Image (spheres, grey):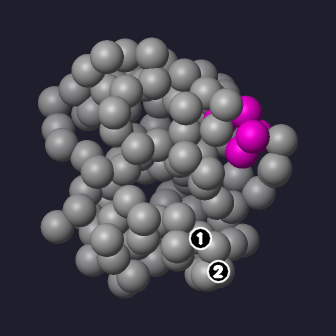
Amino acid sequence: MKRILDIGNCSHDFGLISGMLRKQFAAEVVQCHGPDDSLDALRHGQFDLVLVNRQLDQDYSSGLDIIQTIKADPQLSSIPVMMVTNYAEHQAQAVASGALPGFGKRELYTDQTQQRLGAVLS
């Protein structure tokens, strides 16, 4: 079973995203909310994909900062990361920082999102 770490999505959005991932990819999804618990989970667990919300739910800090921290850490940099946002400019910044092209919450069941996720999870 594939394991996914979801960082910074509110409970409602986490439920939508994790439900789709369980249904479409039979994946286990673990939720974290900020940099400290997320980096701890990554260093002590095995994850096949990390999803980072554009703006974290608890302190509204930038998800891009977490992506940059993950990609700069030699222990974590090989883990695939995607940003969850509907804003193209934020997706572009995430990709420039080493993330794979991600998806927006309104695009959960589109062919493009399913293909992007399938490339990592299938």
Front one among 66 and 36: 66
72 relative to 51, above or below:
above
Label 1–label 2 contact, CB within 8 A: yes
Name the residue that disc number 1 marks: 113
Can residue 115 be seen in the rendering of this structure? yes
Left or right placement of residue 88 versus residue 18 in this view: right
Q: Where is residue 122? Give x, y as percent.
A: 31, 71
Image disc number at residue 60: none
Mark 1 → mark 2, Cα distance in angstroms: 5 Å
49 falls in the magenta region = no
Determine the residue positioned at 34% across, 33% down. 78
Residue bounds of the magenta highlight: 90-94
Q: Main secondary structure of the magenta part?
A: helix
66 relative to 115, above or below:
above
Determine the residue positioned at 37% across, 83% down. 23
Name the residue that disc number 2 marks: 110
**Under tag 2, what secondary structure?**
loop
Q: Where is residue 91? Give x, y as percent.
A: 72, 45
| Label 2 environment density (alpha carbons within 10 Å; few <14, some 14–19, many ≥20) | few
Front one among 84 and 8: 84
Q: Where is residue 6? Give x, y as percent.
A: 43, 49
Instruction: Give the position of the N terminus as an image quadrant.
Output: bottom left
| Label 1 environment density (alpha carbons within 10 Å; few <14, some 14–19, many ≥20) | some
On the image, which quarter does residue 113 sit in?
Answer: bottom right
On the image, which quarter does residue 25 sit in?
Answer: bottom left
On the image, which quarter does residue 2 sit in?
Answer: bottom left
Three-letter code for the amino acid on which mark 1 is drawn: Thr
93 falls in the magenta region = yes
Three-letter code for the amino acid on which mark 2 is drawn: Thr
